[in-house]
Amino acid sequence: MPYLSRLVLDLSCEQAFADLASAYSMHRTVMRAFPAPRDGNRVLYRLDRLPPAGAACLLVQSSQPADWSFLQSMPGYLMAPHEAGMPNPAQTFFAVELRRDEVLSFRLRANPTFRRGRKRLGYRRRGDQLRWLTRQGARWGFEPLAVSVSQEGRLLTRKSFSPRSDALCFVSVLFTGLLRVVCAERLRDAVESGLGSGKAFGLASCHWLVGSERATLLAEA
């Protein structure tokens, strides 16, 4: 049963700004919420902008509850609840209950890719990206219906803070729209484990089903 956390970050905080500027830095901060052995704990996250101005919303999905108490040592990292207009941080758990032929709204930030030899390359054209999503649906038990594609550009990061570490480049695409459930079991696996590559860096993250009772607390964000 997955857990979903919502954190509203204050962009005036130097550390929050640094995390938003570096996918590796954000990954490291997110994983600090899971200090226990993480065997079998898939952690996915996604960043969204939201009002009020000067804030960003971090959604974190995990199979174990997160411990955000370490953020107390990072004053100003989270926006005060009265400024955010919501509890901050907030955490809930939800059962992924899906039914065949059910139509759901979804939001997915993904890294649509293909292999050429040993290299993994990103699809850059909208038509190729939509075909990638359709193939993912055939594999993971859903049919995309009406889909909007937002090009977010390239996501550049490194495997560590060392300038000598390997550079990583992802194509960030935000898919939003409607899907129809074809196989509830396979789609449940996709929701819980992520879809596509780049999971550690905020991509393939939170294959987030909206407009249901499963995540009402966070769907309002």
Image (spheres, rainbow, N blue to C red):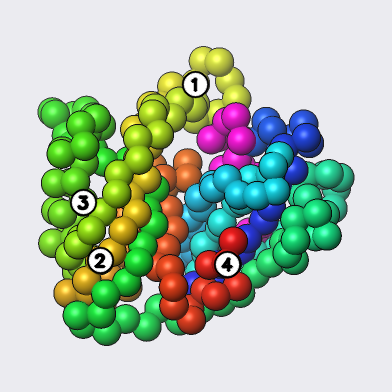
Q: What's under tag 2, amino acid-wise? A: Leu
Earlier-in-chain disc, 1 versus 3: 3
Mark on residue 165?
A: 1
- Label 3 Cα neighbours within 10 Å, binned few <14 / some 14-19 / many ≥20: many
Quarter of the figure with residue 76: top right
Kindly identify which residue carries mark 3.
133
- Taking the spot 48% from the left edge, 55% from the top edge, the residue there is 44
- Label 2 Cα neighbours within 10 Å, binned few <14 / some 14-19 / many ≥20: many
Mark 4 vs mark 3: in front? 4
> Is residue 14 positioned above or below 166 on the image?
below
Element type at mark 1: loop
> Is residue 24 positioned above or below 81 on the image?
above
Label 1, label 2: how far apart the Cα atoms are: 39 Å
In the image, which residues are magenta?
A: 20-37
Is residue 89 covered in magenta?
A: no
Mark 1 vs mark 3: in front? 3
- Label 1 Cα neighbours within 10 Å, binned few <14 / some 14-19 / many ≥20: few
Mark on residue 179?
A: 2
Label 4, label 1: how far apart the Cα atoms are: 39 Å
Q: What's under tag 4, amino acid-wise? A: Glu
Q: Residue furthest top?
A: 164
Counting from the top left corner in percent of width and height, residue 75 is at: 86, 45
Q: Does residue 196 appear in the picture of this structure?
A: no
